[in-house]
Image (tube, rainbow, N blue to C red):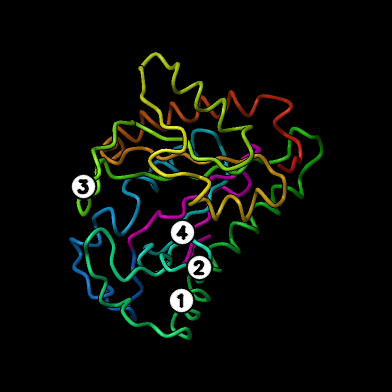
Amino acid sequence: MTNEAFESLNLDGPAPLLLICDHASNHVPAELNNLGLTPQQLSQHVGWDIGAAALTREISKSMDAAAVLSGTSRLVIDANRQPGDATGIPEISDGITITGNQNLSEADQIARTEAYFWPYHHAVADAIAHLRRRETTPQNIPAIFSIHTYTPEVSATDAPARPWQAGVLWNRDPRIAEPLIHLLRTHPDNFVIGDNEPYSGKEVYYSVDFHAGAAGLPHGAIEIRQDLVSSEKGVTYWARIISEILSEILATEELHEIRHY
């Protein structure tokens, strides 16, 4: 199922897992006139998580798992921020002025939320409900896993280059995060893996907290460095690794419990 705000994939996949991708697209609806940006600007990391959509699709295919991907650029409205958050419709991003986001009224912001934010989150909620309706054993309780990518360095700041190949984000529920960090750090390819780096799941974790944390569903998120998934070869490589590790984690019987932290 697809509309301008989201894309749903493989909703009847047998895996007890839903993949979500909040920043899958750099699409700007026609009525917003590209937010005053050039196609080249929208193709940069400010417009979307480069490689995240391809990675999500490949993992969905590999694990035969359901997935929901956001259909519009995070510059239209960020699906991973609470409505009303000052960073949800940014006026400036990594030094780039977003002219189409300047001086929006509250009515303008609400209209964006209703048109693009909630349809995506309703699609996520519907996918979770679909997975839960087929629960027959504890092993069918679904996990929610969010896929992001990040730029190796932030050009508009003096922050040092980011040394990690990937980072695992989490807030209170460690059931996926802790084994994922361990299995990536002990992988034969010697990855440098961040624990709540380069972002913290205690700060930017709206989607998984909203849909999984409150419900007690196991959940987690990963950030892959964008240059590592900017090619088909890179996507295939990381999709294989993440699929293998997630499959191992999902095979843990005690994972599939409703548990509140």
**Residue 166, image x and y in percent?**
38, 33
- Marks 1/2: CA–CA distance: 7 Å
Is residue 25 magenta-colored?
Answer: yes
What span is colored magenta in the figure?
1-26
Residue linked to disc 4: 70
The first of marks 4 and 3 along the sequence is 4
In the rendered structure, find residue 117 and report the number of the disc placed on it.
2
Quarter-wise, where is residue 193 in the image?
top left
**Residue 104, image x and y in percent?**
38, 82
Mark 1 residue element: helix
The residue carrying pointer 1 sits among few (fewer than 14), some (14 to 19) or many (20 or more) residues within 10 Å by Cα, namely some
- Marks 4/2: CA–CA distance: 9 Å
Residue 68 in the figure: left or right of residue 34: right
Quarter-wise, where is residue 249 in the image?
top right
Mark 3 residue element: loop
- Label 4 or label 1, whichever lies nearer to me, is 1
Asked if the residues shown at circle 4 and circle 1 are in contact, with their CB atoms under 8 angstroms apart, the answer is no
Residue 256 in the figure: left or right of residue 187: right
Q: In percent of the image, x 24 and y 38: which residue is there?
A: 161
- Marks 4/3: CA–CA distance: 31 Å
- Label 4 or label 3, whichever lies nearer to me, is 3
The first of marks 4 and 1 along the sequence is 4
- Label 2 or label 3, whichever lies nearer to me, is 3
Residue linked to disc 1: 112
**Residue 221, image x and y in percent?**
51, 41
Is residue 153 magenta-colored?
Answer: no
